[in-house]
Image: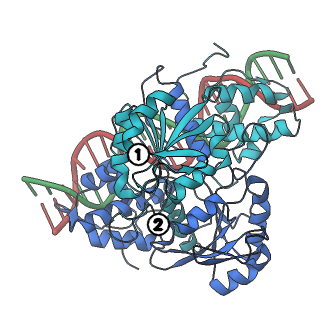
Chain colours: A cyan, B blue, C red, D green
Amino acid sequence: MTGLRSKGPIPEATIERLALYRRSLAVFKARSVTTVGSEQLGEMARVAGATVRRDLSYLGSLGTRGSGYEVGKVLERIEKELGLDRLWPIVIVGVGNLGRALARSEGFSSRGFVVSALVDTDPGLIGSEVAGIRVDAPKALPELVKALGLEIAVITTPADAAQRACDEAVQAGVTAILNFAPRTLEVPPSVILRDVDLSVELHVLSFHQSHRHEAGRRGGSQQPGTVVPSDADRELGGLAQGSRQERQ
Amino acid sequence: MTGLRSKGPIPEATIERLALYRRSLAVFKARSVTTVGSEQLGEMARVAGATVRRDLSYLGSLGTRGSGYEVGKVLERIEKELGLDRLWPIVIVGVGNLGRALARSEGFSSRGFVVSALVDTDPGLIGSEVAGIRVDAPKALPELVKALGLEIAVITTPADAAQRACDEAVQAGVTAILNFAPRTLEVPPSVILRDVDLSVELHVLSFHQSHRHEAGRRGGSQQPGTVVPSDADRELGGLAQGSRQERQ
DNA sequence: CCTTGTGAATGCGTTCACAGCA
DNA sequence: TGCTGTGAACGCATTCACAAGG
Protein backbone atom coordinates (compact mmCIF):
# COMPACT_ATOMS: atom_id res chain seq x y z
CA MET A 1 0.00 0.00 0.00
CA THR A 2 2.41 2.66 1.17
CA GLY A 3 5.99 1.59 0.71
CA LEU A 4 6.58 -1.92 -0.44
CA ARG A 5 6.87 -4.56 2.21
CA SER A 6 10.46 -5.42 1.37
CA LYS A 7 11.36 -8.90 2.49
CA GLY A 8 9.78 -11.37 4.82
CA PRO A 9 8.03 -10.58 8.09
CA ILE A 10 9.47 -7.97 10.42
CA PRO A 11 11.67 -9.52 13.15
CA GLU A 12 10.31 -9.29 16.65
CA ALA A 13 13.43 -7.43 17.77
CA THR A 14 12.87 -4.87 15.07
CA ILE A 15 9.28 -4.26 16.11
CA GLU A 16 10.39 -3.34 19.58
CA ARG A 17 13.01 -1.00 18.27
CA LEU A 18 10.55 0.68 15.94
CA ALA A 19 8.79 1.97 19.03
CA LEU A 20 12.11 3.38 20.21
CA TYR A 21 12.74 5.05 16.89
CA ARG A 22 9.30 6.56 17.08
CA ARG A 23 10.08 8.12 20.42
CA SER A 24 13.37 9.47 19.14
CA LEU A 25 11.86 10.77 15.96
CA ALA A 26 9.21 12.57 17.98
CA VAL A 27 11.99 14.32 19.85
CA PHE A 28 13.66 15.37 16.62
CA LYS A 29 10.36 16.57 15.26
CA ALA A 30 9.79 18.62 18.40
CA ARG A 31 13.17 20.19 17.81
CA SER A 32 12.10 20.99 14.27
CA VAL A 33 14.73 18.72 12.80
CA THR A 34 13.51 17.68 9.36
CA THR A 35 16.12 15.11 8.41
CA VAL A 36 18.16 12.60 10.41
CA GLY A 37 20.84 10.11 9.52
CA SER A 38 20.72 6.51 10.65
CA GLU A 39 23.69 7.21 12.86
CA GLN A 40 22.03 10.11 14.68
CA LEU A 41 18.79 8.28 15.12
CA GLY A 42 20.73 5.30 16.36
CA GLU A 43 22.60 7.36 18.86
CA MET A 44 19.42 8.64 20.42
CA ALA A 45 17.86 5.20 20.53
CA ARG A 46 21.10 3.59 21.62
CA VAL A 47 21.18 1.32 18.59
CA ALA A 48 23.87 0.88 15.92
CA GLY A 49 23.38 2.85 12.73
CA ALA A 50 23.52 -0.28 10.62
CA THR A 51 20.75 -1.78 12.70
CA VAL A 52 18.63 1.31 12.24
CA ARG A 53 19.02 1.11 8.50
CA ARG A 54 18.25 -2.60 8.44
CA ASP A 55 15.20 -2.09 10.63
CA LEU A 56 13.82 0.77 8.58
CA SER A 57 14.46 -1.13 5.37
CA TYR A 58 11.74 -3.56 6.43
CA LEU A 59 9.29 -0.71 5.99
CA GLY A 60 10.46 -0.02 2.47
CA SER A 61 12.86 2.56 1.11
CA LEU A 62 12.13 5.47 3.38
CA GLY A 63 15.45 7.25 3.25
CA THR A 64 17.26 9.36 0.72
CA ARG A 65 20.80 8.31 -0.12
CA GLY A 66 23.19 11.07 0.60
CA SER A 67 21.00 12.93 3.08
CA GLY A 68 19.15 10.60 5.41
CA TYR A 69 15.57 10.10 6.58
CA GLU A 70 12.78 12.63 6.60
CA VAL A 71 11.64 12.82 10.20
CA GLY A 72 7.96 13.40 9.57
CA LYS A 73 7.70 10.81 6.86
CA VAL A 74 9.41 8.03 8.78
CA LEU A 75 7.57 8.88 11.98
CA GLU A 76 4.28 8.56 10.18
CA ARG A 77 5.30 5.32 8.52
CA ILE A 78 6.38 3.75 11.81
CA GLU A 79 3.21 4.80 13.60
CA LYS A 80 1.17 3.28 10.87
CA GLU A 81 3.18 0.07 11.08
CA LEU A 82 2.71 -0.12 14.85
CA GLY A 83 -1.00 0.40 14.45
CA LEU A 84 -0.87 3.82 16.08
CA ASP A 85 -2.91 5.41 13.35
CA ARG A 86 -6.01 4.49 15.24
CA LEU A 87 -7.20 4.60 18.84
CA TRP A 88 -7.00 1.50 21.02
CA PRO A 89 -9.35 1.40 23.98
CA ILE A 90 -7.90 -0.72 26.78
CA VAL A 91 -9.27 -2.21 29.96
CA ILE A 92 -7.26 -2.51 33.15
CA VAL A 93 -8.17 -5.56 35.18
CA GLY A 94 -7.10 -5.19 38.77
CA VAL A 95 -7.40 -1.74 40.31
CA GLY A 96 -4.67 -2.01 42.92
CA ASN A 97 -1.67 0.26 43.32
CA LEU A 98 -0.31 -0.49 39.89
CA GLY A 99 -3.64 -0.54 38.12
CA ARG A 100 -4.47 2.85 39.56
CA ALA A 101 -1.07 4.24 38.67
CA LEU A 102 -1.46 3.09 35.08
CA ALA A 103 -4.98 4.43 34.84
CA ARG A 104 -3.77 7.84 35.97
CA SER A 105 -0.62 7.74 33.92
CA GLU A 106 -0.39 10.31 31.20
CA GLY A 107 1.62 8.27 28.78
CA PHE A 108 -0.59 5.28 29.15
CA SER A 109 -3.56 6.97 27.64
CA SER A 110 -1.59 8.92 25.11
CA ARG A 111 -0.46 8.11 21.63
CA GLY A 112 -3.06 5.67 20.48
CA PHE A 113 -4.25 4.17 23.72
CA VAL A 114 -7.09 5.13 26.01
CA VAL A 115 -7.90 3.49 29.28
CA SER A 116 -11.61 3.00 28.70
CA ALA A 117 -12.58 0.60 31.43
CA LEU A 118 -11.51 -0.63 34.85
CA VAL A 119 -12.41 -3.94 36.39
CA ASP A 120 -11.91 -5.34 39.87
CA THR A 121 -13.49 -7.94 42.11
CA ASP A 122 -13.44 -5.78 45.23
CA PRO A 123 -17.04 -4.80 46.10
CA GLY A 124 -15.64 -1.76 47.81
CA LEU A 125 -14.18 -0.52 44.56
CA ILE A 126 -16.92 -1.47 42.15
CA GLY A 127 -19.03 1.52 41.39
CA SER A 128 -16.37 4.00 42.47
CA GLU A 129 -14.38 6.07 40.05
CA VAL A 130 -10.66 6.05 39.45
CA ALA A 131 -9.07 8.56 37.13
CA GLY A 132 -12.58 9.48 36.07
CA ILE A 133 -13.43 5.96 35.04
CA ARG A 134 -16.02 3.78 36.69
CA VAL A 135 -14.82 0.51 38.17
CA ASP A 136 -16.91 -2.45 37.05
CA ALA A 137 -17.21 -6.03 38.18
CA PRO A 138 -15.59 -8.77 36.06
CA LYS A 139 -18.99 -9.98 34.93
CA ALA A 140 -19.41 -6.71 33.08
CA LEU A 141 -16.48 -7.54 30.82
CA PRO A 142 -18.42 -9.07 27.92
CA GLU A 143 -20.59 -6.03 27.72
CA LEU A 144 -17.68 -3.62 28.06
CA VAL A 145 -15.75 -5.42 25.35
CA LYS A 146 -18.64 -5.23 22.98
CA ALA A 147 -19.68 -1.69 23.81
CA LEU A 148 -16.21 -0.20 23.76
CA GLY A 149 -14.66 -2.38 21.10
CA LEU A 150 -11.98 -3.56 23.51
CA GLU A 151 -9.28 -5.82 22.15
CA ILE A 152 -6.51 -5.17 24.65
CA ALA A 153 -6.53 -5.89 28.39
CA VAL A 154 -3.89 -5.03 30.96
CA ILE A 155 -3.78 -7.37 33.92
CA THR A 156 -2.62 -5.87 37.19
CA THR A 157 -4.21 -8.24 39.67
CA PRO A 158 -2.41 -10.16 42.39
CA ALA A 159 -0.72 -13.29 41.06
CA ASP A 160 -3.33 -15.66 42.40
CA ALA A 161 -6.16 -13.83 40.67
CA ALA A 162 -4.40 -13.35 37.35
CA GLN A 163 -5.38 -16.55 35.59
CA ARG A 164 -9.03 -16.05 36.40
CA ALA A 165 -8.87 -12.43 35.29
CA CYS A 166 -7.16 -13.54 32.12
CA ASP A 167 -9.75 -16.21 31.41
CA GLU A 168 -12.58 -13.77 31.95
CA ALA A 169 -11.00 -11.23 29.66
CA VAL A 170 -10.39 -13.78 26.93
CA GLN A 171 -13.85 -15.20 27.38
CA ALA A 172 -15.23 -11.71 26.97
CA GLY A 173 -13.46 -11.32 23.65
CA VAL A 174 -10.15 -9.68 24.45
CA THR A 175 -7.43 -10.87 22.06
CA ALA A 176 -4.29 -9.21 23.39
CA ILE A 177 -3.06 -9.13 26.98
CA LEU A 178 -0.35 -7.25 28.77
CA ASN A 179 0.29 -9.13 31.99
CA PHE A 180 1.90 -7.53 35.01
CA ALA A 181 1.05 -10.32 37.41
CA PRO A 182 4.05 -12.41 38.42
CA ARG A 183 2.66 -15.60 37.03
CA THR A 184 2.59 -17.61 33.82
CA LEU A 185 -0.75 -17.25 32.13
CA GLU A 186 -2.47 -19.84 30.03
CA VAL A 187 -4.10 -18.40 26.91
CA PRO A 188 -5.39 -19.74 23.61
CA PRO A 189 -2.77 -19.60 20.81
CA SER A 190 -4.73 -16.89 19.07
CA VAL A 191 -4.38 -14.48 21.98
CA ILE A 192 -1.30 -12.30 22.04
CA LEU A 193 0.30 -12.29 25.44
CA ARG A 194 3.09 -10.15 26.78
CA ASP A 195 4.54 -10.21 30.26
CA VAL A 196 6.10 -7.48 32.28
CA ASP A 197 7.63 -8.45 35.57
CA LEU A 198 9.36 -5.77 37.51
CA SER A 199 11.10 -8.11 39.89
CA VAL A 200 12.87 -9.72 36.96
CA GLU A 201 14.31 -6.35 36.12
CA LEU A 202 15.59 -6.00 39.62
CA HIS A 203 16.97 -9.51 39.57
CA VAL A 204 18.94 -8.82 36.45
CA LEU A 205 20.36 -5.71 38.05
CA SER A 206 21.34 -7.52 41.22
CA PHE A 207 22.88 -10.28 39.14
CA HIS A 208 25.13 -7.84 37.34
CA GLN A 209 25.79 -5.95 40.51
CA SER A 210 26.88 -9.13 42.28
CA HIS A 211 29.17 -10.04 39.43
CA ARG A 212 30.87 -6.72 38.98
CA HIS A 213 34.31 -8.02 39.74
CA GLU A 214 34.21 -11.06 37.44
CA ALA A 215 34.46 -10.35 33.73
CA GLY A 216 33.69 -6.91 32.32
CA ARG A 217 30.67 -4.82 33.15
CA ARG A 218 27.56 -4.44 31.05
CA GLY A 219 24.12 -2.97 31.05
CA GLY A 220 21.34 -5.47 31.15
CA SER A 221 19.21 -6.78 28.43
CA GLN A 222 15.81 -7.95 29.44
CA GLN A 223 13.03 -10.44 29.82
CA PRO A 224 10.35 -11.78 32.05
CA GLY A 225 10.68 -12.27 35.70
CA THR A 226 9.05 -13.33 38.84
CA VAL A 227 7.84 -11.94 42.08
CA VAL A 228 7.12 -14.62 44.53
CA PRO A 229 8.38 -13.23 47.80
CA SER A 230 10.07 -16.38 48.85
CA ASP A 231 7.84 -19.37 48.50
CA ALA A 232 4.65 -19.34 46.53
CA ASP A 233 2.69 -16.65 44.80
CA ARG A 234 1.77 -13.53 46.69
CA GLU A 235 0.22 -10.15 46.46
CA LEU A 236 0.21 -8.16 43.29
CA GLY A 237 3.62 -7.49 44.56
CA GLY A 238 6.13 -7.33 41.81
CA LEU A 239 5.14 -5.87 38.61
CA ALA A 240 6.68 -6.27 35.42
CA GLN A 241 9.02 -7.99 33.37
CA GLY A 242 10.70 -6.06 30.93
CA SER A 243 12.28 -4.37 28.23
CA ARG A 244 15.65 -4.75 26.89
CA GLN A 245 18.46 -2.40 26.28
CA GLU A 246 22.09 -2.61 25.51
CA ARG A 247 24.84 -0.40 26.74
CA GLN A 248 26.34 1.87 24.16
CA MET B 1 32.96 -22.08 45.13
CA THR B 2 29.65 -23.91 44.97
CA GLY B 3 29.23 -25.72 41.70
CA LEU B 4 31.83 -25.12 39.08
CA ARG B 5 31.25 -22.27 36.70
CA SER B 6 30.99 -24.49 33.64
CA LYS B 7 31.76 -22.56 30.49
CA GLY B 8 32.07 -18.91 29.69
CA PRO B 9 29.89 -16.12 31.03
CA ILE B 10 26.16 -16.62 31.42
CA PRO B 11 24.21 -15.29 28.42
CA GLU B 12 22.03 -12.30 29.10
CA ALA B 13 18.98 -14.22 27.90
CA THR B 14 19.72 -16.95 30.39
CA ILE B 15 19.98 -14.51 33.27
CA GLU B 16 16.50 -13.28 32.61
CA ARG B 17 15.15 -16.78 32.44
CA LEU B 18 16.83 -17.73 35.69
CA ALA B 19 14.51 -15.29 37.40
CA LEU B 20 11.59 -17.08 35.77
CA TYR B 21 12.83 -20.46 36.87
CA ARG B 22 13.14 -19.09 40.37
CA ARG B 23 9.52 -18.07 40.37
CA SER B 24 8.43 -21.43 39.05
CA LEU B 25 10.61 -23.34 41.49
CA ALA B 26 9.10 -21.33 44.33
CA VAL B 27 5.69 -22.52 43.21
CA PHE B 28 6.84 -26.13 43.14
CA LYS B 29 8.39 -25.72 46.54
CA ALA B 30 5.16 -24.29 47.90
CA ARG B 31 3.44 -27.37 46.56
CA SER B 32 5.98 -29.50 48.38
CA VAL B 33 7.32 -30.90 45.14
CA THR B 34 10.89 -31.98 45.79
CA THR B 35 12.04 -32.87 42.30
CA VAL B 36 11.25 -31.48 38.86
CA GLY B 37 12.27 -32.40 35.36
CA SER B 38 13.53 -29.84 32.88
CA GLU B 39 10.39 -30.39 30.87
CA GLN B 40 8.05 -29.63 33.77
CA LEU B 41 10.01 -26.62 34.85
CA GLY B 42 10.05 -25.46 31.27
CA GLU B 43 6.33 -25.84 30.93
CA MET B 44 5.68 -23.61 33.89
CA ALA B 45 8.15 -21.00 32.72
CA ARG B 46 7.03 -21.33 29.11
CA VAL B 47 10.49 -22.32 27.97
CA ALA B 48 11.68 -25.40 26.06
CA GLY B 49 13.08 -28.21 28.20
CA ALA B 50 16.36 -28.18 26.29
CA THR B 51 16.73 -24.49 27.03
CA VAL B 52 16.10 -25.08 30.71
CA ARG B 53 18.83 -27.71 30.80
CA ARG B 54 21.25 -25.52 28.90
CA ASP B 55 20.51 -22.56 31.16
CA LEU B 56 20.93 -24.54 34.36
CA SER B 57 24.11 -26.11 33.08
CA TYR B 58 25.75 -22.70 33.29
CA LEU B 59 25.39 -22.98 37.03
CA GLY B 60 27.13 -26.32 37.13
CA SER B 61 25.72 -29.83 37.31
CA LEU B 62 22.72 -29.29 39.47
CA GLY B 63 20.54 -32.11 38.28
CA THR B 64 20.52 -35.85 38.72
CA ARG B 65 20.41 -37.93 35.56
CA GLY B 66 17.43 -40.16 35.58
CA SER B 67 15.37 -38.16 38.06
CA GLY B 68 15.67 -34.42 37.52
CA TYR B 69 16.44 -31.35 39.62
CA GLU B 70 16.05 -30.98 43.35
CA VAL B 71 13.74 -28.01 43.80
CA GLY B 72 15.28 -26.64 46.96
CA LYS B 73 18.83 -27.03 45.79
CA VAL B 74 18.34 -25.40 42.41
CA LEU B 75 16.22 -22.63 43.88
CA GLU B 76 18.96 -21.80 46.32
CA ARG B 77 21.63 -21.92 43.66
CA ILE B 78 19.70 -19.60 41.35
CA GLU B 79 19.01 -17.11 44.12
CA LYS B 80 22.65 -17.05 44.97
CA GLU B 81 23.55 -16.49 41.33
CA LEU B 82 21.06 -13.63 41.02
CA GLY B 83 22.48 -12.06 44.13
CA LEU B 84 19.30 -12.67 46.10
CA ASP B 85 21.16 -14.13 49.04
CA ARG B 86 21.47 -10.64 50.43
CA LEU B 87 19.24 -7.62 50.85
CA TRP B 88 19.34 -4.78 48.34
CA PRO B 89 18.11 -1.42 49.57
CA ILE B 90 16.72 0.63 46.70
CA VAL B 91 15.77 4.26 46.26
CA ILE B 92 12.85 5.38 44.14
CA VAL B 93 13.45 8.71 42.46
CA GLY B 94 10.19 10.33 41.44
CA VAL B 95 7.23 9.87 43.73
CA GLY B 96 4.44 10.19 41.20
CA ASN B 97 1.73 7.67 40.45
CA LEU B 98 4.14 4.96 39.44
CA GLY B 99 6.72 5.69 42.10
CA ARG B 100 4.06 5.51 44.78
CA ALA B 101 2.64 2.30 43.35
CA LEU B 102 6.04 0.68 43.37
CA ALA B 103 6.80 1.89 46.87
CA ARG B 104 3.58 0.34 48.09
CA SER B 105 3.95 -2.79 46.03
CA GLU B 106 4.39 -5.98 47.98
CA GLY B 107 6.55 -7.74 45.48
CA PHE B 108 8.80 -4.82 45.03
CA SER B 109 10.07 -4.97 48.55
CA SER B 110 10.06 -8.72 48.75
CA ARG B 111 12.66 -11.27 47.92
CA GLY B 112 15.87 -9.39 48.30
CA PHE B 113 14.80 -5.82 47.74
CA VAL B 114 13.64 -3.14 50.15
CA VAL B 115 12.50 0.29 49.16
CA SER B 116 14.60 2.25 51.62
CA ALA B 117 14.35 5.77 50.34
CA LEU B 118 12.14 8.03 48.26
CA VAL B 119 13.24 11.17 46.48
CA ASP B 120 11.30 13.86 44.69
CA THR B 121 11.74 17.51 43.77
CA ASP B 122 8.21 18.53 44.75
CA PRO B 123 8.39 20.69 47.90
CA GLY B 124 4.88 19.56 48.68
CA LEU B 125 6.01 15.98 48.90
CA ILE B 126 9.34 16.40 50.61
CA GLY B 127 8.99 15.64 54.27
CA SER B 128 5.79 13.68 53.82
CA GLU B 129 5.63 9.93 54.11
CA VAL B 130 4.66 7.42 51.44
CA ALA B 131 4.35 3.77 52.30
CA GLY B 132 5.92 4.62 55.63
CA ILE B 133 8.98 6.10 54.04
CA ARG B 134 10.00 9.73 54.25
CA VAL B 135 10.32 11.59 50.97
CA ASP B 136 13.61 13.45 50.68
CA ALA B 137 14.94 16.10 48.34
CA PRO B 138 17.42 15.09 45.64
CA LYS B 139 20.22 16.84 47.45
CA ALA B 140 19.87 14.27 50.21
CA LEU B 141 20.89 11.49 47.83
CA PRO B 142 24.61 11.39 48.63
CA GLU B 143 23.84 11.03 52.29
CA LEU B 144 21.13 8.45 51.73
CA VAL B 145 23.39 6.41 49.50
CA LYS B 146 26.12 6.39 52.09
CA ALA B 147 23.89 5.83 55.08
CA LEU B 148 21.78 3.09 53.55
CA GLY B 149 24.36 1.49 51.32
CA LEU B 150 22.27 2.15 48.24
CA GLU B 151 23.53 0.79 44.95
CA ILE B 152 20.28 0.58 43.00
CA ALA B 153 17.96 3.42 42.01
CA VAL B 154 14.60 3.23 40.29
CA ILE B 155 13.72 6.26 38.22
CA THR B 156 10.03 7.05 37.91
CA THR B 157 10.17 10.75 37.15
CA PRO B 158 8.60 12.46 34.13
CA ALA B 159 10.72 12.10 31.01
CA ASP B 160 12.07 15.62 31.15
CA ALA B 161 13.36 15.20 34.68
CA ALA B 162 14.84 11.75 34.20
CA GLN B 163 18.33 12.70 33.03
CA ARG B 164 18.82 15.06 35.92
CA ALA B 165 17.52 12.50 38.37
CA CYS B 166 19.83 9.94 36.82
CA ASP B 167 22.84 12.22 37.04
CA GLU B 168 22.13 13.02 40.65
CA ALA B 169 21.76 9.36 41.53
CA VAL B 170 24.96 8.42 39.75
CA GLN B 171 26.76 11.36 41.28
CA ALA B 172 25.60 10.20 44.68
CA GLY B 173 27.13 6.80 44.12
CA VAL B 174 24.36 4.66 42.68
CA THR B 175 25.76 2.10 40.23
CA ALA B 176 22.65 0.40 38.87
CA ILE B 177 19.53 2.05 37.50
CA LEU B 178 16.11 0.81 36.53
CA ASN B 179 14.59 3.49 34.34
CA PHE B 180 10.87 3.84 33.81
CA ALA B 181 11.02 7.24 32.21
CA PRO B 182 10.36 7.21 28.47
CA ARG B 183 13.70 8.61 27.55
CA THR B 184 17.22 7.48 26.73
CA LEU B 185 19.49 8.08 29.66
CA GLU B 186 23.17 8.90 29.49
CA VAL B 187 25.22 7.06 32.08
CA PRO B 188 28.89 6.22 32.58
CA PRO B 189 29.86 2.79 31.18
CA SER B 190 30.33 1.44 34.67
CA VAL B 191 26.71 2.04 35.60
CA ILE B 192 24.27 -0.72 34.82
CA LEU B 193 21.16 0.64 33.16
CA ARG B 194 17.92 -1.08 32.36
CA ASP B 195 14.86 0.44 30.77
CA VAL B 196 11.24 -0.42 31.16
CA ASP B 197 8.82 1.38 28.92
CA LEU B 198 5.22 0.40 29.16
CA SER B 199 4.17 2.11 25.98
CA VAL B 200 6.55 -0.07 24.04
CA GLU B 201 4.71 -3.06 25.34
CA LEU B 202 1.46 -1.62 24.15
CA HIS B 203 2.98 -0.75 20.81
CA VAL B 204 4.12 -4.29 20.25
CA LEU B 205 0.64 -5.52 21.08
CA SER B 206 -1.02 -3.09 18.71
CA PHE B 207 1.47 -4.02 16.03
CA HIS B 208 0.55 -7.68 16.26
CA GLN B 209 -3.09 -6.84 16.61
CA SER B 210 -2.98 -4.74 13.44
CA HIS B 211 -1.26 -7.50 11.54
CA ARG B 212 -3.46 -10.38 12.56
CA HIS B 213 -4.58 -11.16 9.05
CA GLU B 214 -1.17 -11.17 7.40
CA ALA B 215 1.07 -14.13 8.15
CA GLY B 216 0.39 -16.40 11.11
CA ARG B 217 -0.34 -15.20 14.60
CA ARG B 218 2.10 -15.05 17.44
CA GLY B 219 2.47 -13.86 20.95
CA GLY B 220 4.81 -10.99 21.31
CA SER B 221 8.27 -11.01 22.55
CA GLN B 222 9.37 -7.79 24.06
CA GLN B 223 11.62 -4.85 24.42
CA PRO B 224 11.94 -1.18 25.06
CA GLY B 225 9.50 1.38 24.02
CA THR B 226 8.54 4.92 24.12
CA VAL B 227 5.91 7.16 25.52
CA VAL B 228 5.94 10.50 23.93
CA PRO B 229 2.28 11.34 23.46
CA SER B 230 2.67 12.57 19.98
CA ASP B 231 5.49 14.99 19.62
CA ALA B 232 8.14 15.51 22.23
CA ASP B 233 8.60 14.17 25.70
CA ARG B 234 5.80 14.50 28.18
CA GLU B 235 4.65 13.68 31.63
CA LEU B 236 5.82 10.61 33.44
CA GLY B 237 3.25 9.19 31.19
CA GLY B 238 4.24 5.86 29.85
CA LEU B 239 6.12 3.58 31.99
CA ALA B 240 8.09 0.75 31.06
CA GLN B 241 9.69 -1.07 28.45
CA GLY B 242 9.79 -4.59 28.87
CA SER B 243 10.20 -8.19 29.17
CA ARG B 244 9.99 -10.80 26.60
CA GLN B 245 8.04 -13.94 26.17
CA GLU B 246 7.27 -16.37 23.46
CA ARG B 247 4.09 -18.20 22.75
CA GLN B 248 4.14 -21.88 23.44
C1' DC C 1 30.38 13.19 -2.02
C1' DC C 2 27.53 11.31 1.38
C1' DT C 3 24.27 8.15 3.26
C1' DT C 4 21.05 4.58 2.28
C1' DG C 5 19.98 -0.21 1.30
C1' DT C 6 21.56 -4.80 1.34
C1' DG C 7 24.34 -9.20 0.14
C1' DA C 8 27.59 -11.62 2.82
C1' DA C 9 30.00 -12.60 7.06
C1' DT C 10 29.68 -13.14 11.77
C1' DG C 11 28.00 -13.99 16.27
C1' DC C 12 24.70 -15.51 19.55
C1' DG C 13 21.18 -18.28 21.24
C1' DT C 14 18.09 -22.10 20.62
C1' DT C 15 17.14 -26.74 19.46
C1' DC C 16 18.51 -31.32 18.18
C1' DA C 17 20.08 -35.56 19.31
C1' DC C 18 22.51 -38.56 21.92
C1' DA C 19 26.27 -40.01 24.99
C1' DG C 20 26.79 -40.22 29.93
C1' DC C 21 25.35 -41.57 34.21
C1' DA C 22 22.32 -42.22 38.50
C1' DT D 1 15.33 -47.03 32.18
C1' DG D 2 15.05 -42.14 32.20
C1' DC D 3 16.66 -37.65 32.37
C1' DT D 4 20.61 -34.67 32.51
C1' DG D 5 24.46 -32.43 30.24
C1' DT D 6 26.42 -31.05 25.97
C1' DG D 7 28.70 -31.27 21.11
C1' DA D 8 26.93 -30.12 16.89
C1' DA D 9 23.45 -28.30 13.75
C1' DC D 10 20.54 -24.71 12.95
C1' DG D 11 18.31 -20.24 12.67
C1' DC D 12 17.85 -15.57 13.68
C1' DA D 13 19.74 -11.08 14.40
C1' DT D 14 23.55 -7.96 14.20
C1' DT D 15 27.39 -6.07 11.92
C1' DC D 16 30.40 -5.47 8.07
C1' DA D 17 31.39 -3.53 3.95
C1' DC D 18 30.29 -1.76 -0.28
C1' DA D 19 27.49 -1.07 -4.41
C1' DA D 20 23.63 1.97 -5.54
C1' DG D 21 22.02 6.29 -6.18
C1' DG D 22 20.25 11.05 -4.89
Quarter-of-image position of residue A181: bottom left
Q: Indicate left or right for B27 with C22 as reference.
A: right
What amino acid type is highlighted by mark number 1? Ala
Instruction: Specify the subunit that label 2 lies on.
Output: B
- Determine whether A14 is above or below B141 in the image: above
Pointer 2 local density, CA inside 10 Å: few below 14, some 14–19, many at least 20:
many
For label 1, the residue is A137
Mark sitting on residue B107: 2
Between A128 and B116, the residue placed more toward the observer is A128
- Determine whether A34 is above or below B102 in the image: above
Residue B33: percent from left, percent from top: 20, 66
**Are the residues under marks 1 and 2 on the same chain?**
no
Residue A235: percent from left, percent from top: 41, 64
Between B8 and A58, the residue placed more toward the observer is A58
Q: Indicate left or right for A225 with D15 as reference.
A: left
Q: Using the numbered discs, state the Cα–Cα distance from disc 1 to disc 2 in whole angstroms.
A: 25 Å
Residue A205: percent from left, percent from top: 56, 65
**Is residue A66 visible in the rendered structure shown here?**
yes
- Determine whether A81 is above or below A45 in the image: above
Q: Indicate left or right for A16 with C4 as reference.
A: left
Callout 1 touching callout 2 (CB < 8 Å): no
**Is residue A218 visible in the rendered structure shown here?**
no
Pointer 1 local density, CA inside 10 Å: few below 14, some 14–19, many at least 20:
some
- SS at mark 1? loop
What amino acid type is highlighted by mark number 2? Gly
- Which residue is at 39% across, 52% downward? A121
Instruction: Specify the subunit that label 1 lies on.
Output: A
Quarter-of-image position of residue B230: top right
Instruction: Identify the image quadrant of the C terminus of chain A.
Output: bottom right
- Which residue is at 32% across, 66% downward? A232
